[in-house]
Structure formats: structure tokens, C-alpha cells
Amino acid sequence: MGSLTALEERITEKLAQHKKQLAVKQQQLDQTMKELLEQRERLSAVAESRVEAIIMPRLERLARQFQNAEIEVVHTDEGFISTCRFAHTPQFPATVRLSIELLPASSDQLTARYDLSILPALMEYSQNAEKNIQLGDEESLAAWVEDRVLAFLDDYLRLETHPLYQKDNLVVDVVCGMHISFVSAATTLERNGYTYYFCSEHCRDLFLEKFEDLIPHQEAEKKV
């Protein structure tokens, strides 16, 4: 039967080995975290420069076309989110948020992420897109952002004519009987305090020539 002293020595040795293993693992973890944080800082600096040089100028060009648009950039723990918000207007009756996020993907790549929110959601549209881009490939990032901006425009401009969004803006062209949105009427006429909306110049001209004295004023501004 072994001595208790020998057992104690073996226990002490095993505990020492375990402590040494923990110290090695901690050292490895410290080194890994140091490298990850340095990589994150490096990628964050690159991402910030790409936001300033590529993403924001393109969103600003977009926002200039709309009086209801405003832009902001938010720095999160993961990356940078550039957002263009569009307030609800009669012409574009929805609250819209377009976001382009840039965040680290790997040691030599960034992830560009596109998110679009349209409220109320009364139509189908492209809500998300994502692409990994090499750190030094500024041209690919610029091209991707421009494609996203143009795709956004396709969706946003649909609000101006989509029947579900424009249902509260519908009026009747008293000449042809067509239902049109008053915000997109081709032309209008003011008569005796009433507004007439027309789908085309032809309908307005025909109204002036033949119908002006025949149509009661209550037909003006008639909502559907």
C-alpha cells in the first residue's frame, strides 16, 4: 500500500500541472483577444474611412432630391450604420428608412449590409441585401452602394402611384372619369374656390372648351 506522502505529492503535482495548463490557456486567450481587438480597430478605421468617402456621399446625393429626407451615421459596437430617413408626405405616404451598414467580416473583408423599412407595409419590396467585400476593393463597394441606392429608388417611387398607398389621395378627373392621385395630377384648374384635377392636358383643354359650364362645382375635389 502506497504512503500518504506519495499520494499528497501526486495530488500536488497534478494541481500544479492543472494550474500551469490554465496559465497557458489564459496566455493564449490574452494573445488571441489582443489580436482580435487590434484587428477590429484596424477594420473599424477602414470602415469609417469607407463610410466617409463612399457611402455618405452617395446617400447625400440621394437625399438632395427629396425635401423629406435626412441622414445620420451611428457607430455601433459592430460597425457603422448610415441611415437615410424619409418622412411621410402626401406624395410618398409612408415612413421609410434606408440603412447601409459596414462591419468587419474577416481579417481582410468587410460586410456591407442593406436594410429597407417601409411603414405601413402595403406592398412587396426588397428589404435586405448583403455582400462581403475585400478591404482594398473600394470600386466594388461603391458599385454595390450605387446599385442599392437605385434599387431603393425603384421601390420608393412606387409609393407615388401604388393604389394602396394613394387611396386617400384619389380624386376624379371630371372629364374622363379616371381616378387619379391629386398629388400626381398632370394639371389643375381653380374655379370659384374649387380645384379641378386632370389626368392630362387634353382633359383640361376639353374641360375649358366644352364642359366648364355643365359640371357642378361639387364634382371638384371629389374623393373616391
Image: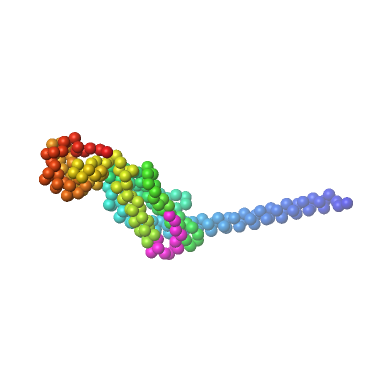
Say which residue appears at 28% left-offset and 45% top-offset.
Answer: 91
Say which residue appears at 31% left-offset and 53% top-offset.
Answer: 62
Q: Quadrant of the C terminus?
A: top left
The mark tally for this picture is: 0
> Is residue 72 at all visible to an observer of this figure?
no
Q: Is residue 77 left or right of residue 67?
A: right
User: Is residue 130 one of those drawn in magenta?
Assistant: yes
Say which residue appears at 45% left-offset and 53% top-offset.
Answer: 79
User: Is residue 102 one of those drawn in magenta?
Assistant: no
Q: Nearer the viewer, residue 152 or 75?
A: 152
Q: Position of residue 17 (x, y in %)?
A: 71, 55
Q: Is residue 117 left or right of residue 18?
A: left
Say which residue appears at 64% left-offset and 57% top-offset.
Answer: 24
Q: Position of residue 148 (x, y in %)?
A: 37, 56
Q: Is residue 198 left or right of residue 142?
A: left
Q: Nearer the viewer, residue 154 or 37?
A: 154
Q: Position of residue 172 (x, y in %)?
A: 23, 41
Start-end of magenta stretch: 129-141
> Is residue 137 at all visible to an observer of this figure?
yes
Q: Nearer the viewer, residue 72 or 195?
A: 195
Instruction: Check the image and name the residue furthest to the right.
Output: 1
Colour scheme employed for the rendering of this structure: rainbow
Q: Position of residue 168 (x, y in %)?
A: 29, 39
Q: Is residue 34 left or right of residue 63?
A: right
